[in-house]
Image (tube, rainbow, N blue to C red):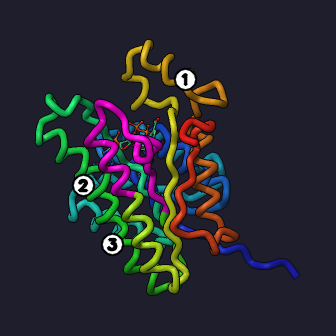
Amino acid sequence: MSEEKIIRTAVVTGGSRGIGRAVCVQLARQGCNVVVNYCHGEAAAAETVALCSAAGANAVAVQADVSTAEGCKALFEQAVNTFGQVDILVNNAGITRDNLILRMTEADFDAVLNANLKGAFLCCKEAARRMVRQRWGRIINLSSVVALRGNAGQANYAASKAGLIGLTKSLARELASRNVTVNAVAPGFIETDMTAALPEAVRAEMAKGIPAGRAGRPEDVANAVAFFAAEQSSYLTGQVLCADGGMAM
Ligand code: NAP
């Protein structure tokens, strides 16, 4: 007798491009319904939805600014209205406002903390309420190797990504007994719009410090996220997995 396959619903914040898009497509391939959240990139989000549909999944794009409580509330309401529940949350949305500390403004600091850390906190709150009730959930937060090593010019970004590790471990402890796991993936240097903005010399210098000898692809990170999202990963919680070609070890 064949076991009936459970269809899980995943919300991926910042799913319109880069790593978030690759995560959406990977989860779609694994048979999940996918909610592709975006902030500004409506056309890009529609492309991600089309890629998920081509992979055989049901997918929908939802505009929401996750740095606001109203945005997160609306995102989850729309996800539940469309698919009935939320089983997997991937907190991927993120921004940078790089500068050395002497030039970094308070606004730069707040913008990054609000999008990267507060946004994840707000989405975790929305997700946890529902996951605890259904006694099943997977939360995966996108941190960074700079959370572990620091990076000159990224005090705000590194602080937000280190904060995500504290959030991950605390929620892992709070939610473990309800069959809700909370883990973090820490990417190294990945080819996306975020890193394309760096000068070529900086990119070449960074690539030298990667034992794998190349920058990562969004798919390299998506595989790690999908690993934590899988049914079989129920005994893994509070972990930080570096997807970095060996960069941070
Ligand atoms: P990216 O290409 O710059 O894409 C960022 C995504 O986040 C976009 O989909 C964007 O949506 C969304 N976003 C930003 N602010 C948002 C908000 N307030 N509400 C909702 N969505 C928002 O970035 P990426 O390189 O793929 O990075 C994805 C995640 O991995 C980030 O958390 C990043 O910090 C982390 N990471 C990346 C690297 C790397 O090397 N690339 C390394 C370590 C960690 P719109 O375009 O629709 O506005």
Q: What's the amino acid at mark 3?
A: Lys
Q: Earlier in the sequence, mark 3 or mark 1?
A: 3
Pick the quarter of the image with the C terminus: top right
Q: Residues within 10 Å of mark 1 (few under 14, many from 20)?
A: some
User: Dot 2 corresponds to which residue?
Assistant: 67
Q: Earlier in the sequence, mark 2 or mark 1?
A: 2
Q: Name which residue lies at 23% across and 29% down.
A: 99
Q: Is residue 41 magenta?
A: no
- In x, y percent, where is residue 18? 47, 37
Tell me: 76 left or right of 102: right
Gap in angstroms between the C-alphas marked 3 and 2: 13 Å
- Residue 232, quarter of picture: bottom right
Q: Name which residue lies at 45% across and 57% down.
A: 141
Q: Is residue 12 above or below residue 216?
A: below
Task: Out of 16 and 141, give the one closest to the viewer.
Answer: 141
Q: Which residues are magenta?
A: 140-164
Tell me: 99 left or right of 179: left
Q: Is residue 235 above or below residue 70?
A: below
Q: What's the amino acid at mark 1?
A: Ala
Pick the quarter of the image with the N terminus: bottom right
Under 8 Å from ligand 1: the CB of mark 2? yes
Q: Name which residue lies at 44% across and 13% down.
A: 200
